[in-house]
Image (spheres, helix red, strand yellow):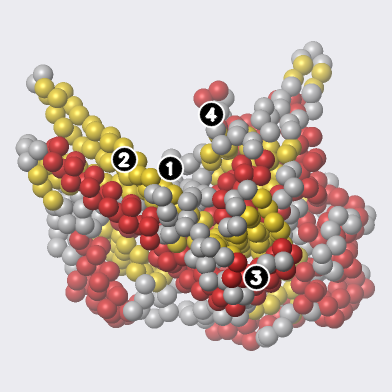
Amino acid sequence: MAVLLGVDTGGTYTDAVLIRDETEVLASAKALTTRHDLAEGIGAAVRAVLEAAGLRGKEVGMAALSTTLATNALVEGQGERVGLVFIGFRETDLIKHRISDALKGDPVCVLAGGHDHSGSEVRRLDEVGLLTFLETHNQGVSGWAVAAQFATRNPGHELRAAEIIGAATGAPVTCSHQLSARLNGPKRAVTAVLNARLIGMIDRLIARAGDSLAGLGIDARLMVVRGDGALMSAEQARLRPIETILSGPAASIVGARWLTGVTDGLVSDIGGTTTDVAVLRDGRPAIDPDGARVGGFRTMVEAVAMRTTGLGGDSQVHVETDGLGGGVRLGPRRVVPVSLMAIDAPDLVHRTMEAQLRSATPGELDARFARLVPGVSRAGLGDREAALMERIGDGVQALTAVLRTRMDHGALTKLVGRGIVQVAGVTPSDASHVLGLSEAWDATAARMAVELMARKRVGTGERLAPDADRLARMIVMQLQEQTTMALLETAFAEETAAFEGTPEALSRHVLTRLGLVGHRGLLAVDLALNVPVIGLGASAPTYYPEVGTRLRCDMVLPEHAGVANAVGAVVGRVTVRRSGTVTAPSEGLYRVHLETPEDFNDPATALTRLEAVLRDSVEGHARAAGAGDIEIHMQRHIKTAQAEAREVFVEAEIVAEASGRPRVASG
């Protein structure tokens, strides 16, 4: 019997599942994700699932991890301080291509150097300028990104710059050509910056996950789910953490297919931080041809075509005071539910909100709390941030006690963005506790927090809601409304050829609204989703039946919907893809763009050489990732042109793919 362990570390819960012989779910379990030390949540979930199945750790033959950590970090603007070395580009490219937005004020060095489209050097690399820059900007930088012009045609300058940076700083270096073989240097630069920002975070997760598994007697190989649903080794994930963005959602799609047998439909996975919607076609997730888009940035990471919305069970509830009626909106930022924060500090949380309820005037910071997250780098912070951390201390504090000036609000925003501080506030999870839909945490604290929000005033001067129950229903209905919009936007985005307008505008169009309710007048208007929706996530059974009713479609809620990510982690395949290019810089010359470009006199020899290199590369990486029974597929895409009645070779791309199921150790 082969026993497979799947673990998913989400923003709120860590899930674990055991599957026997890739056919049967033996047991599943959940534990709270412990952001200060992910090992605690992983250990608790794995220990619980082993006990539920009556198995010992040494009986596990393979372990696989999917995680929303990288996705959530980019959505919430978190990550460590990095530096960028930008070679052969203009200073204006930083703003034009939003690289400055990705850097968020972190150091950047624009250097002379780079190559042209044929891989020939345009200018020599300014090594002296790089060393001078490193001497003054090395402090507090956890990782470096290097992006050079046409590095995919000749990576020499990126590799040399990485060598210099590594020797001078000892910090990890991400070269853009190692993340993608496609052109578009600025886009590769953004991808490299985000990868560098995630390295420390993912490294800690994998290290602590390994410690937790070893402590339970599990010595099986650890795999990690990539953003396209395939598996990679933990060692590969440490070097290229950007490839784990959308890891959790990708695993959920693989899990949804395995759990339901549905081959065509929409998959909607609600977590604590995000709702992820994807399309399932012919049993496979659709891949985004333009690269994964997360946190407002388009990357060059091959991943599932996913619409990620900052909407989850732990989304912050905002009060809308515009207009006479008022209302609420959710997200995109995640906060800790007050009902969960009260588990850690019940006396302070209850005492604070009881005092706030006795006040005749609602306060801006009512039912808001903060706590520090241990173990996160605090390099590069100013005096104001340090003073605010000092006031927060080691426990939970009310924001009314630590925020003294408006400038403190800015300091808090910076600390939250760096992942150093967690803030608690009212969330849909709290609303569910008020309505009795959930009983996991402190329902009394949830009711007080929602009541405090209900007292806020709208445009008429009236209360937002007459009581906590009414506001809780408003919050749940708003979550269902925003989920409905996310699903409609995905559907319209897939059928752009049939409609004029953006998916956002179409989903909110008056005819769409009328069609969903089956309007009958002089016109009969009907609109519905024409495919089933697979609802995933622990809270999907609570919120999604009404969403299915609104969209007039089948809502499929599988038995193990709450652990679909963990299921998908262990039923996927190891898949490695690499691509390479052959160009013709001049007549009779054919250049293979390897780490050191090689020239040949005829295209057939050049293509054969590139194909051999790619075949060896994908097979070696797949084997290193733990794959067995490897299958390799090669594709050639050759561009030619007609010139003087003859066909002329222009360029060729070869794509190599190796795939296989991970090798499973016997118990």
Per the model, the C-alpha gap separating discs 2 and 4 is: 32 Å
Say the numbered circle drawn on residue 634. Answer: 2
Q: Quadrant of the N terminus?
A: bottom right
Q: Which type of secondary structure does the marked residue at label 2 adopt?
A: strand
Q: Do the residues under discs 1 and 2 have CB atoms within 8 angstroms?
A: no
**Mark closer to the chain start, 1 or 4:** 1
Q: Secondary structure at mark 3?
A: loop
Q: Residues within 10 Å of mark 2 (few under 14, many from 20)?
A: some
Q: CA distance from mark 3 to mark 1?
A: 44 Å
Residues at circles 3 and 4 in contact by the CB criterion of under 8 Å: no
Q: Pointer 1: residues within 10 angstroms few (<14), some, or many (20+)? A: few
Above-or-below relation of 597 to 518? below
Write down the residue under mark 3: 56
Report the side of 184 relative to 360 (left or right). left
Gap between marks 3 and 4 measured at Cα: 52 Å
Q: Residues within 10 Å of mark 3 (few under 14, many from 20)?
A: some
Nearest-to-viewer mark from 2 and 4: 2
Q: Which residue is mark 1?
A: 290
- Inspect the image, locate mark 2, and give the three-letter code of the amino acid beneath it: Met
The picture places residue 438, in percent across and down from the top left corner, at 84, 58
First reached walking from the N terminus: tag 2 or tag 4: 4
Kindly tell me whether residue 249 is visible in this rendering. Answer: no
Q: Nearer the viewer, mark 1 or mark 2?
A: 2
The one nearer the camera, 455 or 344, is 344
Label 1: element kind? loop
